[in-house]
Amino acid sequence: MAGVIAWRAFNQAIGSNGDVGIWHETYLVAPGRYENIYNNMPPYGLGLAGALTDAVGARQAARQRIRTTA
């Protein structure tokens, strides 16, 4: 719960104003089961190797993205 509170505080204080870039990658142990997320920064890491898709709709939450690709 503390992580959720900290994340909300970050988004309220900084959000997507361009001051901070975020890069996150998630791997599931199976070929092609990965994601990388960028906010306020150019593609990096795996994002340079494939096509990027906006995390909107059914892809907005990690829980939904993993379920969609399972």
Image: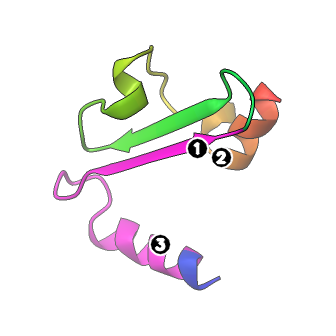
Residue named by callout 1: 26
Q: Residue at x 30, y 33 (%)?
A: 44
In magenta, the rendered stretch is 4-28
Viewer-nearest of labels 2 and 3? 2
Residue at (74%, 48%) from the top-left corner? 63
Task: Name the residue type under label 2.
Answer: Ala
x and y, in percent, of residue 18 in the image: 18, 51
Q: Which mark is residue 62?
A: 2
Asked whether 37 falls inside the magenta stretch, the response is no
Nearest to N terminus: mark 2 or mark 3: 3
Q: Nearer the viewer, residue 13 or 42?
A: 42
- Is residue 41 visible in the rendered image? The answer is yes
* Membership of 19 in magenta stretch: yes
**Position of 18 relative to 60 (above/below):** below
Q: Are marks 1 and 2 in contact (CB under 8 Å)?
A: yes
Q: Residues within 10 Å of mark 3 (few under 14, many from 20)?
A: few
How was the colour assigned to the protein in this rendering? rainbow
Query: Is residue 48 rendered to the left or right of residue 52?
Result: left
Q: Which residue is denoted by mark 3 in the rendering?
A: 8
Determine the secondary structure under disc 2: helix
Give how far across and how far down residue 51 sits, in percent. 44, 14
Q: Is residue 35 left or right of residue 40?
A: right
Q: CA distance from mark 2 to mark 3?
A: 16 Å
